[in-house]
Image: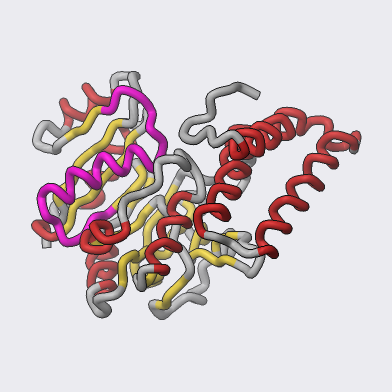
Amino acid sequence: MKNSIAAVILNWKKPADTLLCLETLGDKVSAVVVDNGSQDGSVERIRMAKPDVPLISLEKNNGYAGGNNAGIIWALAQDFEWILLINEDALLPPEALDRLVKAARQDPRVGFAGPLILHAQPENVIQSAGGLLDERWRASHRGQNQVDEGQYTHPEEVRWLSGCVLLVRARMVREIGMLDERFFLYEEELEWCLRGAQAGWKALFVPSARASHAGVSLEYEPQPYVTYYMTRNHFLLLSKQGAGLLPWSDAILSTLRTLASWTFKPKWRSKNAHRNAMWLGMLDFARRHWGEMKETV
């Protein structure tokens, strides 16, 4: 199986996590580490610990999309059948990878496959059991923060999958293209799955494959930069996918309502930075400023 699967591990200032991710994957994959412009000694530490693992060192942070695309290019050049994208702070044991690949191989039109993703702490709480998308194009993680009681048992097609641990079929990538680097962070894996669906590819959730991800805790409170990317990128998603009137009107009205609350209601005065980030996200969508956020809020 090793010769058929490439694992792209995206590192940003977490070399210890990256090394643990590598160790957990085992020897069933051909791994490449992409350092996303850490400039904190990560490259040297990883190379010293794993001299036989290829490492791509980027000069600057290219975001989730750009960093992973560098690894995808490496994998496509070597003609792997499958490409596993995995964040440095996620863990996928070899037996989980086996189940993921086995399930995906049952249907030649499966382009994406994702495991049941659990929080690192507490270990029995679900982070994502596949992605939902309602008629207003509001995306959410199914089962998020539910206790895992075995409620998800069978592989099933979903609208989208979390990008922290995501198996993709190389043939599909050659057909539909890589991640859209305009997004930089957030909603890029959603757009990718939707783009795949438009071309007839499926996203398969495989609950028998279990992964853990430490990047988001139960007490997670998003920073203003998250508000910026989620605002700008949601409008970009709607534009690129040709969404209808309902998603557009919902996005505009809900954004304006939130801005009004954060501006005029005294209890939300602490949200000034988020308000400024949301305004900037709308402005940057209007003026087509993509990639990394250029201004501070």
- Residue 269 inside the magenta-drawn segment: no
Q: Image height check: is 289 above or below 180?
A: above
Would residue 83 appear left or right of 242 to someone viewing this image? left
Q: Is residue 177 visible?
A: yes
Q: Image height check: is 104 above or below 43?
A: below
* Scheme by which the image is coloured: secondary structure
Q: Is residue 206 visible?
A: no
Residue 221, image quadrant: top right
Q: Image height check: is 184 above or below 86?
A: above
Residue 202, image quadrant: bottom left
Task: State the count of labels.
Answer: 0
Q: Residue 209: x and y, percent?
A: 34, 67
Q: Residue 36: x and y, percent?
A: 33, 31
Q: Residue 262: x and y, percent?
A: 81, 37
Residue 23, image quadrant: top left
Closest to the observer: 23 or 131?
131
Closest to the observer: 265 or 293?
293
- Residue 78 inside the magenta-drawn segment: yes
Q: Image height check: is 40 above or below 67?
A: above
Task: Residue at the far top: name it.
Answer: 40
Q: Tell me what residue is drawn at x 26 percent, y 36 percent.
A: 34
Q: Tell me what residue is drawn at x 27 percent, y 63 percent.
A: 172
Q: Which residues are magenta?
A: 58-84
Q: Tell me what residue is drawn at x 45 percent, y 40 percent.
A: 182
Would residue 169 appear left or right of 184 to someone viewing this image? left
Q: Tell me what residue is drawn at x 26 percent, y 61 percent.
A: 175
Would residue 130 appear left or right of 82 to someone viewing this image? right
**Quadrant (top left/top right/bottom left/bottom right) for the C terminus:** top right
Q: Residue 12: x and y, percent?
A: 37, 31
